[in-house]
Image: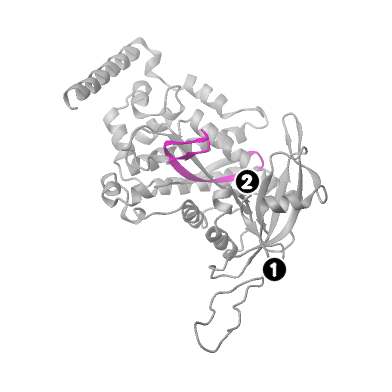
Amino acid sequence: MKAQQFLKGLFHEGKSNIERMHECIPDSDYQQLHHFISESNWDAFAVMRTVAQHTQQSLQAVDGEQGLLLDESGWEKAGTKSVGVARQYIGQVGKVCNAQVGMFAALVRGDKVGLVNARLYLPAEWTDKPARCKAIGVPAQDQSYKSKPQLAVAMLSELAPVVSYDWVGGDSIYGNSPDLRTYLLAQQQRFVLDVGSELTVFLTDPSPAVPPAKAIRGRQPTRAQTHQPRYSLSTVLAGLGATGWQMLVYRRGSQGKLVREAQLLPVWLWKPDWKTSPQALSLLISREVDGSAVKYSLVYEPSGQTDLLISLQRQMQRYWVERAFQDSKEQLGLHQNQTRCWAGWYHHVALTLMALHFMLETRLESQDDIPLLSCSDIKLMLARTLLNKLHQSEGIWQAIEQRHRQRFNNAYRYIYQT
């Protein structure tokens, strides 16, 4: 019952926090809804696994291969009490600010996408203070610091028995991680992972080896070395010049063909402190026809037969995840959770992912009759269809009175408790 009320609240016109939901959802109780999200012990991860299974089933109606994309999304958050809040860089606003950051996994096929898993990133200033984590409900196993690539591995491990996919993609946070690449290589998992231009690679096999001892006495060499030079990706690009580029149509957009220049190069990645052999991969470099907006990705294909067009199409699929974030925030209020605790964050996100899947399924079912149906269209129809206490004068006055009481209580606490 409470889950239904919360989901209906996500589809209403107002903000997706419990106060505004209570104002419009018939027969709802603020305290019960708040307890359901912030304190009830239902399993958010089980909900996300179910969402993943249903998303996989829904996407079977779409032609083409299926990818699993890793990405993060953050949102500004006032104060310091909400779990995971810290000053950190948020790409969506282009600056360092007080914010929460979530790591997400998405299934994508063609232009259809569904968010299927999530992890809250806890900065070191949280994990360095176990008492702070415990006070806000962070489980003991999650109180140690985990990097964003480590959280990605956790999501991949959880999703492995639940869904299937042809390849894994992600931005440079993941592509720059040797450990994540090692994990995917061990799984023989195809990937196209973005990397930064500062990353260094070998253009020939470095063939690292421990050098022979120079003397009978003294410390003997133990670390492998190589005499091959490494190059930054920006240096590799500069050395290509105008040769070797292919102009490819990677997708058809609403205004015509989308075209980029691209080429693939064999590269090797290795550092002396690695305990593994060099990673033999392909480097995909693509750019706009005028040479702008350069993107670099590391590509792995177990068969060794890497296709340039397929690699480029996979590289450009991250666009749809950004659209999913946009829809989940603008239409469903992914970022509008006002509870401070660990459970509250996961419960809010899990139900938002469920609502987003409902929108995906509705769009797929309506594709023949309403091919341009969008998430905002669905939200508009539901907001006008669902029962809403604010559509009656009595409900409006009740909401106003409740807001006035809340303002008075806030003012009282400020005056007499500070």
Given residues 264 and 376, the one toward you in this image is 264
Q: How packed is label 1: few (under 14 Cα within 10 Å), some, or many (20 or more)?
A: some
Q: Earlier in the sequence, mark 2 or mark 1?
A: 2
Foreground mark, 2 or 1? 1
Looking at the figure, which quarter contains the N terminus? top left
- The image position of residue 313, as x and y in percent, is 70, 46
Mark drawn on residue 161: none
- Give the residue pinned by disc 2: 60
What predominant SS class does the magenta segment belong to? Answer: strand
Please say whether residue 1 is visible from this viewpoint.
Answer: no
Q: Is residue 105 magenta-colored?
A: yes
Residue 94 in the image: above or below residue 186 = above
Tag 2: amino acid = Gln
The structure residue drawn at horizontal position 52% and vertical position 82%, both measured from the top left corner, is 220
Q: How packed is label 2: few (under 14 Cα within 10 Å), some, or many (20 or more)?
A: few
Describe the element under mark 2 as helix, strand or loop.
Answer: loop
Looking at the figure, which quarter contains the C terminus? top left
Hey, which quadrant is residue 393 in on the image? top left
* Count of numbered tags: 2
Which stretch did the figure color magenta? Answer: 88-112
The structure residue drawn at horizontal position 72% and vertical position 66%, both measured from the top left corner, is 204
Q: Is residue 134 magenta-colored?
A: no
- Give the residue pinned by disc 1: 205
Gap in Å between the C-alphas at discs 2 and 1? Answer: 40 Å
Q: Is 100 situated left or right of 60 in this image?
A: left
The structure residue drawn at horizontal position 31% and vertical position 55%, both measured from the top left corner, is 140
- The image position of residue 214, as x and y in percent, is 59, 84
